[in-house]
Structures are given as structure tokens and as C-alpha cells.
Amino acid sequence: MHALTVLAALVMYRIGLWQWHKGRAEGDWLNYGYAAQWWLFVAFAVGMWVKLVLDELQPGRVVEREARTERRDREAEELSATIASASAAAPVEDEDDEELAAYNRHLAWLHENARR
């Protein structure tokens, strides 16, 4: 994994350098953009490699991250359930304005069928 990361980073850096020189020779800004893009790929690859190495060296990081994710998911479900129970649509009564009553019935139907 280490050798592959180093090789990929070197290849992407060299491609970016080639694009830079090509842009310089042709005066084309598009090639400068591609060079920057390749160098961003290098930064991303190195960043992910660092993250993977730290996860291997400190397995507790992964467990903590999973626990935080599970806690956030649980809190989101509780909040969703609270909102759903608090905003449970009362039956729409016919009002004096038939157009408003039809609109309210449509909104109630949308609320009931939002989870489909």
C-alpha cells in the first residue's frame, strides 16, 4: 500500500508538471487548471494514505468514529420521531372556503405520504 501510494503520487505529480509546462509553452490556462487538478489528486491520495495509516496505528479512532456516527443516527431518528408525533396532522375539517379546504386536504395527504 505504501509503495503504491508513493508511486501513484509521483506519477500524478509528474503529469501535473507536464501539464504545467504544456500550458506555459502554449499559453493555455486550461492546462494550468489541469496541472492544479493533478496536484490536488496527489494531496487527496496522500491525505487518505495518512488517514489509513493512523487508523491502522490507532484502531480506537475507528471505533470512536463509528460510535459517534451511531449516536448521531440514533439522535436523528429520535428527532424525526419527535417531529412526526408533534406535527401529526389533525383531520382537516371542511372550512367555509372550499378552495382552502381542498388545499389543506392536499397538504395533509402530502404529509401522510412523505415517507414513500
Image (spheres, rainbow, N blue to C red):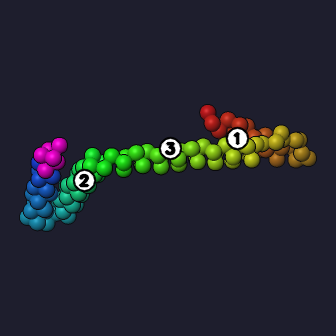
Q: Position of residue 82 (x, y in %)?
A: 69, 46
Left or right: 90, with 72 as reference point? right
Mark 3, other Cα within 10 Å: few <14 / some 14–19 / many ≥20:
few
Task: Name the kind of residue labelled 3 in the image.
Answer: Glu
Q: Which residue is mark 3?
A: 70
Residue 100 appearing in the image: yes
Where on the picture, by quarter, is residue 99? Answer: top right
Q: Position of residue 27 (x, y in %)?
A: 13, 66
- Closest to the observer: 47 or 91? 47
Single out the mark in the foreground, 2 or 1: 2
Q: Earlier in the sequence, mark 1 or mark 3?
A: 3
Q: Which residue is mark 2?
A: 50
Q: Callout 1: helix, strand or loop?
A: helix
Distance between the Cα atoms at labels 2 and 3? 24 Å
Task: Name the kind of residue labelled 1 in the image.
Answer: His
**Badge count:** 3
Residue 111: which disc?
1
Q: Which residues are magenta?
A: 1-6
Task: Name the kind of residue labelled 2 in the image.
Answer: Val
Distance between the Cα atoms at labels 2 and 1? 46 Å
Q: Callout 2: helix, strand or loop?
A: helix
Residue 12 appearing in the image: no
Q: Earlier in the sequence, mark 2 or mark 1?
A: 2
Where on the picture, by quarter, is residue 37? Answer: bottom left
Distance between the Cα atoms at labels 1 and 3? 27 Å
Quadrant where the C terminus sits is top right
- Closest to the observer: 77 or 37? 77
Q: Callout 3: helix, strand or loop?
A: helix
Quadrant where the N terminus sits is top left
Single out the mark in the foreground, 1 or 3: 3
Q: Earlier in the sequence, mark 2 or mark 3?
A: 2
